[in-house]
Amino acid sequence: MLKLDTVDLRIMEGLGIYGPRNVTRLARKLNVSPETLRKRLRRIRSQIFLYTNVYCTNLGLKKAVVSAQAIPGYEQLLFDCLKMNDFWMYVNRCYGVNEGCFGIYGIPKDHTLEFEGFISELEKLRIANDTKIFWSTCFQQVHARCNWFNFKDAKWIFPWDEWISEIPTETT
């Protein structure tokens, strides 16, 4: 299990705020040397999956969120098939009642029909059923924050009740 300390979480938070492209700038903002930052990033990346969020719309891509239930016995084949093209950004297995896979793709906007055909073919080949594609121009991830981690107890904390109580006061 990865042990995170304050500096590690500040690095992860900084990546979300400043982006991953300029290590020197991020190191300066975090008041650590660039070499220390690189070493910590290598250690963190070797133990957990870090990714960046690219604004696909500006690149002429549409985001596709795919859900596919595997035919029993074909779970790994479904996973492998969903990673066959180079447009996937994230693909993961899902376990439980609807065992299968979940994926996020950046598809060139002029090739959405071909992608839909690719996903449809998984059902025709009896590798998956109940496939769904949800198209989105863009959505953003929530970046980890240091104040969401209790270092004393080494646990993530989320003040759900506080956040929910703020909803009625938000303005549009």
Image (tube, rainbow, N blue to C red):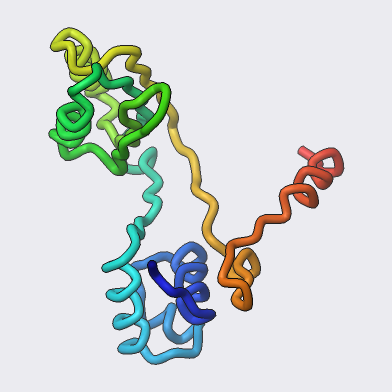
Q: In the image, what residue occupies the spot 34% across and 62% down?
A: 48
Residue 153: percent from left, percent from top: 62, 72
Looking at the image, residue 23 lies above or below residue 86: below
Q: Name the side, left or right, on which 44 lies relative to 153.
A: left
Q: Name the side, left or right, on which 45 lies relative to 141.
A: left
Whether residue 60 can be seen here: no
Q: Name the side, left or right, on which 30 lies relative to 133.
A: right
22 or 12: which is nearer to us? 12
When asked about the image quadrant of residue 120, the answer is top left
160 or 141: which is nearer to us? 160
Q: In the image, what residue occupies the spot 43% across and 32% down?
A: 137
Quarter of the figure with the C terminus:
top right
Looking at the image, residue 75 lies above or below residue 122: below
Residue 4: percent from left, percent from top: 46, 74
When asked about the image quadrant of residue 129, the answer is top left
Residue 155: percent from left, percent from top: 58, 65
51 or 57: which is nearer to us? 51
Q: Residue furthest toward the top?
A: 124
Q: In the image, what residue occupies the spot 35% across and 74% down?
A: 22
Whether residue 118 can be seen here: yes
Residue 62: percent from left, percent from top: 35, 31
Q: In the image, what residue occupies the spot 48% across and 62% down?
A: 16
